[in-house]
Image: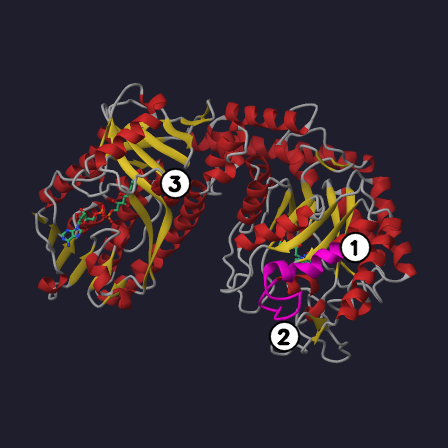
Amino acid sequence: MRIVCIGGGPAGLFFSIVMKSARPDAKIVVLERNRPDDTFGWGVVFSDQTLGNIAAADPPTYERIAQSFVHWDDIDVHYRGRTIRAGGQGFAGIARKRLLRILQERAASLGVDLRFEVEADDEDHARADVLLIADGANSATRRKYAGAFGTTLEPRRNRYIWLGTHRRFDAFTFAFEETEHGWFQVHAYQFDAELGTVIVECREETWRAAGLDTASAEESIAFCERLFAPYLGGHRLMSNAKHLANPWISFVQVNNARWFHGNKVLIGDAAHTAHFSIGSGTKLALEDAIGLAGALRRNPELTRAFEEYEAERRIEVLRLQNAARNSTEWFENVARYASLEPEQFAYSLLTRSQRLTHDNLRLRDRQYIANIEAWLSQRAGARNPVPPMFTPFRLRELELPNRVVVSPMAMYSCVDGTPNDFYLVHLGARAQGGAGLVFTEMTCVAPDGRISPGCAGMWREEHVAAWQRIVEFAHTYTRAKIGLQLGHAGPKGSTQRGWEEADEPLPDGNWPVMGPSPIPFGERHQIPRAMTRADMERVTEQFVRAAGMGLRCGFDMLELHCAHGYLLSSFITPLTNRRTDAYGGSLENRLRYPLEVFAAIRAVWPAYKPMSVRISATDWVEGGITPNDAVEIARAFDAAGADLIDVSAGQTSRLAQPVYGRMFQTPFSDKIRNELRIATMAVGNITDADQVNSIVAAGRADLVALARPHLSDPYFSLHAAAQLGYDEQHWPEQYLPGRDQYLRNLRRAAQIAAEAASEVTK
Ligand SMILES: Cc1cc2nc3c(=O)[nH]c(=O)nc-3n(C[C@H](O)[C@H](O)[C@H](O)COP(=O)(O)OP(=O)(O)OC[C@H]3O[C@@H](n4cnc5c(N)ncnc54)[C@H](O)[C@@H]3O)c2cc1C
Ligand SMILES: Cc1cc2nc3c(=O)[nH]c(=O)nc-3n(C[C@H](O)[C@H](O)[C@H](O)COP(=O)(O)O)c2cc1C
């Protein structure tokens, strides 16, 4: 087998090592345009897991790398004159030059044909069995076949410069400095006995405003030395890319729909990039090399081997790219977090990728978490330090005992809108379960405003009595507060119950629906009647009447449902609002009717009781609502007197292409909360207490709503309190023996796990 590898970076070299070890008869040539010692980076970092993978793939390489590593445990965050340190992070750094030297020597010792200072062209090697495209993020070979690979390149918003220094950092160091042009940040770490890497980064517009776009390398370095002098201890910064006209780079997100084409296969940065702020580019390159060599070893048939390689590696790459995207966005939006206190700023930074959670940080540094919990608790007015999810929260006169909310969930079990015993038990059990706030489902303001015939309502006198019974139960027997979500289904009305053909019209007995424009939600849906001014006034009155009835029921809080494609949401999104009057067109116009409804309700809802608004922060559709629009929507409702924005997403169009994942909507809440400095609630695939703690502690939301987790466990918060050792949680007195047994069982399970762990280590 003859393999030609274009590019002698970590990917190409390590592939040649693993492949040549497994198939000594293979003829492998690596072509590198630079000299062996040229490299334009400084250091790279690896996690213990990556080191384990290298050790398993090629022990001699691992041993030499391990001898060269500088280890460190702490992360320091320097921000607004404070330094926050978090320990137990476990990194290992190595000079990129040293890493390449080790890989080059190992490859040469195995008989790989390494040729330097060769500008490779794939056409000169068309007859090779395998042509490895390992020429980095800027790959010219990939560019040539961009159509076949389905390449997409997404330049990001920041500029960065990669420098070196003799300053010896004793921790992975992040430093933030604000200038008149915007924020600059440093990512710095030591990678050998003498040298450290310093990456300076800022927004493109900040870079231009500071004149760095026209600065020489020397001027840029001098600028960085001045700005970050407090962290450099008198040491200089050095560049090894002075040959470039401007050493500031834009990170480009590289993706390829297909990783191979004929005998050509992409690997490392040529195939995909992951932002340097999660330090995983070299890891991915080395692991690709292991994956590809393994697939070629197992499959004599080339296409089969490439398919297996791509299938195996794509999932891991996607996982890391998702984390890297969150991290990239964090560093692109430092100004958004600049209002946070240093404690929360640092926590937000540490958890920016949403992969590292509160529990992970506790395992790494117990004291760091104790400090942040004490700080958050004191700020929230808790008597003692408590886990973040159990800190109290206040909205107007409403005191919530903790941050957990039972999200609104339609149960489709009413007759003529009247909540029956199912609702008493369902909402009652969830109120007993320890959440701070329980929401009713979308309670419809009129019979023709229902989603389905089973939906809950608030338009008849008997609804008041039925809801009152539920509210009284919550107030009498639990510490939970109870909120009423009011809505009107609009164009998504007259559909089947959730467990039937959800969101599809009734088989018969449909009632007429209306919306901003005559645009049906789906193929089988009715065409809604475009609302007249009289329709709008009537519906506003229905909302006001329902709010008044809700007040008589004793609800603590009111939420206006402006999400998920229902009536008010269908006015906001341009996908369903094509009106040419004052209620269509610009976002300002599309918001006009929802804001009118909000103002009318706010006028009758007492000033001491809070109101929230649920919005869809994106339509997940090209041309629909974007997260930037969502900030404007939230701003408008905030100005109208909303106390909290409940940040959901989507469900406004059948064309939506949502990107699911754990806590996938939380970044929208983070954006709205921290750009506008207003209270928000996060929701969507938040499934455990650890995630709730992380979201609250990082200031990504003030409240956290869980829907489906509360269907499988009404006692979610009671269980979380017991698991976290939070003993001030109120349990219904009647259930105290159950609590005691649950705690005993937890202790017993922990003991068994500890015994099993010590058996393994014996
Ligand atoms: C500022 C910054 C900091 C980073 N920090 C880290 C970190 O801490 N940890 C980490 O894991 N990763 C880090 N990375 C990412 C890391 O550098 C890359 O992900 C990694 O080097 C990818 O390896 P590769 O072999 O695919 O590509 P590269 O390392 O880019 O290697 C490609 C090689 O191909 C050669 N080449 C290109 N075209 C030709 C041609 N036509 N003929 C011959 N040779 C050619 C190039 O000279 C180069 O040597 C960082 C990246 C940047 C930009
Ligand atoms: C059965 C069910 C019914 C729902 N009904 C409503 C509703 O009436 N109003 C609303 O705003 N959201 C409703 N939702 C959406 C949830 O409130 C929540 O936003 C969504 O399920 C994501 O949260 P989760 O991942 O915790 O389930 C419903 C969700 C489910 C599962």
Query: Would residue 542 appear left or right of 34 to someone viewing this image?
Result: right
- Magenta region, residue range: 573-598
Residue 130 rendering spot, x and y as whole percentages:
17, 61
Say which residue appears at 78% left-offset and 50% top-offset.
602
Q: Please identify, in this view, whether the residue under mark 3 or under mark 2 is nearer the observer.
A: 3
Say which residue appears at 31% left-offset and 65% top-offset.
150
Q: Which residue is mark 3?
A: 206
| Type of amino acid at the residue the image marks with label 1 | Ala
Q: Secondary structure at mark 1?
A: helix
| Type of amino acid at the residue the image marks with label 2 | Ile
Near-viewer residue (61 or 416): 416
| Image quarter (top left, top right, bottom left or bottom right) of the C terminus | top left
- Disc 2 versus disc 1: distance between alpha carbons? 27 Å
Q: Secondary structure at mark 2?
A: loop
Name which quarter of the figure residue 42 lies in.
Answer: top left
Q: Secondary structure at mark 3?
A: helix
Residue 361 rendering spot, x and y as whole percentages:
49, 32
Query: Would residue 106 appear left or right of 168 to someone viewing this image?
Result: left
Q: Residues within 10 Å of mark 2 (few under 14, many from 20)?
A: many
Q: Which residue is mark 2?
A: 519
| Type of amino acid at the residue the image marks with label 3 | Thr
Query: Would residue 308 appear left or right of 438 to someone viewing this image?
Result: left
Question: Compared with residue 456, is residue 375 higher up or lower down, i.e. above or below?
Answer: above
Question: Compared with residue 13, is residue 514 higher up or lower down, i.e. above or below?
Answer: below
- Earlier residue among tags 3 and 2: 3
In this rendering, does residue 569 appear at all? yes
Q: Which residue is mark 1?
A: 600
Say which residue appears at 82% left-offset and 57% top-offset.
544
Q: Is residue 590 magenta?
A: yes
Which residue, as the protein is rendered here, is positioned at the far top?
Answer: 234
Question: Compared with residue 505, is residue 599 higher up or lower down, i.e. above or below?
Answer: above
Disc 2 + disc 1, Cβ < 8 Å: no
